[in-house]
Image (cartoon, rainbow, N blue to C red):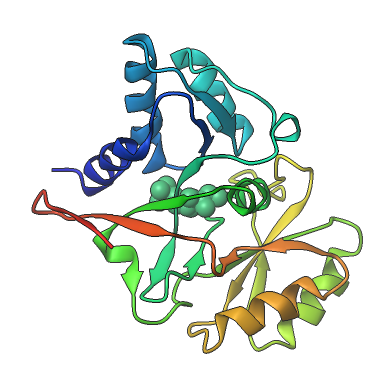
Amino acid sequence: MNPKKIAGEKAVHYVEDGMTVGLGTGSTVYFSIIKLGELVKEGLDIKGVPTSIQTEKLAIDLGIPLVSMSSVDYLDLTIDGADEANHDFELIKGGGGALLREKMVASISEKFIVVIDETKYVTQLGKFPLPVEIVPFSWETTINTIKKLGCTPKIRMNQDASPFVTDNQNYIADCYFEMIDNPAELNQQLNMISGVVENGLFINMADSIVLGKENGEVTII
Ligand code: 5RP
């Protein structure tokens, strides 16, 4: 059993007729979006708000009706993946580089459901390098300032050695902390740095975690 698939599909049970649904980005929520596409074909009436160009394309291919975030006051529900989640429902996101739109969409969602496999459910955040979206202008200055918070930041690169550019035309600094003692404080400290657009710590946002396991079980926390 693919733990990402079972978690992704299970989360779709939260979706009801008439809802506006935030559609996350990544290989776990991919399975939620595929399932939603099937249900839309069978008559489910929803509108999606995509968190990335990649998800937008997928949803269009599947025939899921989309609306822009600016046209709604709130979303009923968002389903999205994460790179790590701790027992306080604090998350690291942005492995796919979509953290800014993901955070914006989650921030106006009534309910935020996280879909992960069990390997990502941890007691302490930080093994996964924290993605931080920064503006390209003088990025060297920005990562030098980020470094003072106790990490090693590295600009994310493509295979052709060019910098990875987000949907918002920014760079991603992957910040190697190893352990994050106080995620809420770090979230604020990072966003105070000029040059930082947003960081991948999601604090007080997740309502529920749908955890897929290798043995085929799904746990909802
Ligand atoms: C993208 C994200 C993803 O949700 C996160 O990286 C998890 O992805 P996957 O489900 O492919 O492991 O934050 O920016």
* Residue 103 percent across, percent down from the top left: 63, 53
* Residue 31 percent across, percent down from the top left: 33, 34
Of all residues, the one furthest to the right in this rendering is 137
Q: Is residue 149 left or right of residue 7?
A: right
Q: Residue at x 76, y 34 (%)?
A: 70
Q: Quadrant of the C terminus?
A: bottom left
Q: Quadrant of residue 139?
A: bottom right
Q: Residue at x 72, y 61 (%)?
A: 198
In the image, 59 versus 196, the foreground residue is 59
Q: How many marks?
A: 0
Q: Is residue 46 above or below residue 31?
A: above
Of all residues, the one furthest to the left in this rendering is 215
Q: Residue at x 56, y 87 (%)?
A: 182
Q: Is residue 196 above or below residue 113?
A: below
In the image, 170 versus 64, the foreground residue is 64
Q: Is residue 66 left or right of residue 122?
A: right
Q: Residue at x 61, y 36 (%)?
A: 52
In the image, 176 versus 23, the foreground residue is 23
In the image, 67 versus 176, the foreground residue is 67
* Residue 20 percent across, percent down from the top left: 54, 31
Q: Is residue 88 left or right of residue 48?
A: left
Q: Is residue 52 left or right of residue 117?
A: right
Q: Quadrant of residue 149?
A: bottom right
Q: Quadrant of residue 29?
A: top left
* Residue 135 percent across, percent down from the top left: 83, 57
Q: Quadrant of the N terminus?
A: top left
